[in-house]
Amino acid sequence: MTAVRPEPLGLLEGLASTRAIRRFRPDPIPEADLATILWHATRAPSGSNRQPTRFVVLRDGPAARAAKAALGRSFRAGWAEKAAAEQYGQGSGADPGSPKARQVIAMQRFVDRFEDIPAVVLACNLRHRAPHPTEGASVYPACQNLLLAARALGYGGVMTTWHGDVEDELRPLLGIPDDVGIAATIPLGRPEGSHGPVRRRPLAEVVFDDRWDEPAAWAVDPEGTRFAGGPRRHSR
Ligand SMILES: Cc1cc2nc3c(=O)[nH]c(=O)nc-3n(C[C@H](O)[C@H](O)[C@H](O)COP(=O)(O)O)c2cc1C
């Protein structure tokens, strides 16, 4: 199989256009590419350079297949719960042509085909103290590095946390010790869709100057930036 190498991508361009990818081609990821992706993931910073992240890569070995089956169940339950709680099928979601309805289809397809995803990386946290509210903080930079490195090689993935329901099942299956937390589950593969500019809130909404809520006149989005909001948690 000849690997198709993407055009080299500038760092800032990669940051601005690495989307969450949930549709994958079935082709396995060559081991050399996995090694490159994981090497770059391990270049991420961590508190005191303690480097607590451990990566369990689930491909098609017997343990991986069993773990993917458990994860598939957990992802389907996780999505069902989120879709119901956030009423995805209602409002504009009831119109089959709406972006919300398309998102529902994409998410359902993602969870239904979870077992076929070529590589699923469990980003684990080798704890050095009792579970702690900020314990993921030294793992998540590595997760984002991993996604960006995958992107640079023409792959895509998505950061997820829907492993929680089957963590107790995964531990004995994969031999994950009790003092290791599973911080994230990252499916990876060649995207069926494409990457492209991500949409976020305008800078004016999220950057303050000098003190909370003071507008930062200099924080201007580049020309042509397209925006998306998210669930609102604060009054502004
Ligand atoms: C901490 C965190 C948890 C996430 N958990 C999930 C998840 O459980 N399932 C999922 O499908 N996506 C999950 N995502 C992916 C987000 O939905 C996605 O990154 C976000 O919507 C932005 O997508 P975009 O970059 O394509 O715009 C998670 C992302 C983060 C950073």
Image (cartoon, rainbow, N blue to C red):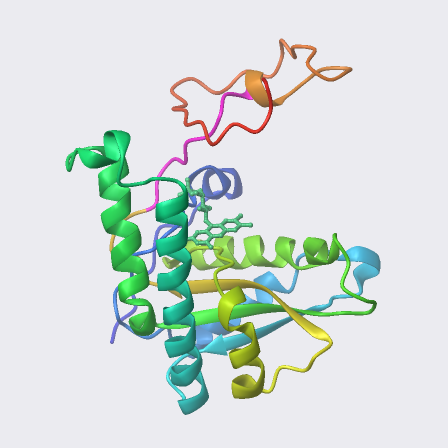
Looking at the image, the residue that sits furthest to the left is 96
Q: Is residue 221 left or right of residue 209?
A: left
**At 38% across and 35% down in the image, what residue appears?**
197
Q: Is residue 52 left or right of residue 119?
A: right
Q: For residue 207, what is the image quadrant?
A: top right
- In which quadrant is the C terminus drawn? top right
Q: For residue 52, what is the image quadrant?
A: bottom right
Tell me the magenta residue range.
195-203
Main SS, magenta region, reads loop
Instruction: Report x, y in % for residue 164.
Output: 53, 65
- Residue nearest the viewer, comparing 68 with 84: 84
**At 56% across and 53% down in the image, what residue appears?**
144
Instruction: Report x, y in % for residue 222.
Output: 47, 20
- Residue nearest the viewer, comparing 64 with 98: 98
Instruction: Report x, y in % for residue 24.
Output: 29, 62
**At 27% across and 35% down in the image, what residue appears?**
90
Q: For residue 85, what is the image quadrant?
A: top left
Instruction: Judge whether residue 4 can be spotted in this image.
Output: no
- In which quadrant is the N terminus drawn? bottom left
Instruction: Report x, y in % for residue 92.
Output: 25, 30
Instruction: Judge whether residue 215 can be spotted in this image.
Output: yes
Q: Is residue 5 above or below residue 66?
A: above
Q: Is residue 56 above or below residue 38?
A: below
Q: Is residue 29 above or below residue 88?
A: below
167 part of magenta stretch: no
200 part of magenta stretch: yes
- Residue nearest the viewer, comparing 185 with 43: 185
